[in-house]
Image: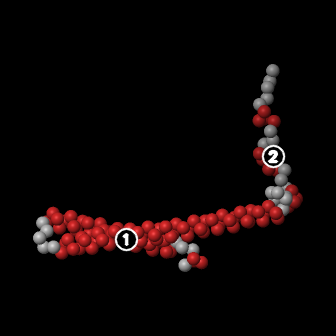
């Protein structure tokens, strides 16, 4: 008994491709889901709603970043001020002076990072909200 595999009876890919002709391609029309313009209008409304949601999210993120940068600047200003006062004292030991310089350098680096964060939040704000 000779059993033929199921795939052997299927048409070859080239044979299937050969069945497509210019008339069948020209007569093929894109199918609209749900029957026409109503589906396109629904899809358009959904896209507009998603776009609005994304714009609101972007606005919230930018405002949050600006608020965070502002809130971190207040204690940072105090740290920088006190480190300057401490460094102006002449009776500091070498170790104390090194620690104050480290504090001041780190605080200045953090201040630069916060400035960049604030700038980034301003540049990411959508044009209509500036």
Q: Which one is closest to the eye, mark 2 or mark 1? A: 1
Q: What percent of the width, then of the height, locates residue 34?
A: 82, 57
Q: Report whether 21 appears left or right of 105.
A: right
Give the Cα distance between marks 2 and 1: 72 Å
Helix, strand or loop at mark 2:
helix
First in residue order: circle 2 vs circle 1: 2
Q: Is residue 86 visible?
A: yes
Q: Report whether 71 appears left or right of 93.
A: right
Please name the residue shown 81% across and 36% down the image: 9
Q: What percent of the width, then of the height, locates residue 47?
A: 69, 64
Q: Residues within 10 Å of mark 2 (few under 14, many from 20)?
A: few
Helix, strand or loop at mark 1:
helix
Camera-nearest residue between 27 and 90: 90
Q: Report whether 60 appears left or right of 101.
A: right
Q: What percent of the width, then of the height, locates residue 81?
A: 27, 73
Please name the residue shown 87% across and 60% down the image: 27
Q: What percent of the width, then of the height, locates residue 12?
A: 78, 42
Q: Report whether 26 appears left or right of 106.
A: right
The label shown at residue 88 is: none
Please name the residue shown 54% across and 67% down the image: 60
| Res 6 → quadrant | top right
Q: Residue furthest top?
A: 1
> Where 20 sits versus 63, above or below?
above
Q: Is residue 22 visible?
A: no
Please name the residue shown 21% across and 64% down the image: 99
Camera-nearest residue between 122 and 10: 122
Q: Residues within 10 Å of mark 1 (few under 14, many from 20)?
A: some
Which coloring applies here? secondary structure
Q: Mark 1 = which residue?
A: 73
Q: Mark 2 = which residue?
A: 15
């Amino acid at each position: 008994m000779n059993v033929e595999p199921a795939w052997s009876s299927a048409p070859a890919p080239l044979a299937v491709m050969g069945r497509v002709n210019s008339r069948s391609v020209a007569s093929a029309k894109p199918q609209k889901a749900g029957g026409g313009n109503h589906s396109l209008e629904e899809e358009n409304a959904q896209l507009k709603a998603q776009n609005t949601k994304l714009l609101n999210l972007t606005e919230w993120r930018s405002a949050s970043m600006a608020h965070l940068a502002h809130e971190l600047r207040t204690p940072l200003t105090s740290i920088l001020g006190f480190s300057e006062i401490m460094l102006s004292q002449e009776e500091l030991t070498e170790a104390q002076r090194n620690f104050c310089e480290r504090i001041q350098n780190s605080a200045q680096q953090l201040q630069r990072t916060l400035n960049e964060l604030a700038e980034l939040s301003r540049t990411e704000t959508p044009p209509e909200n500036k």
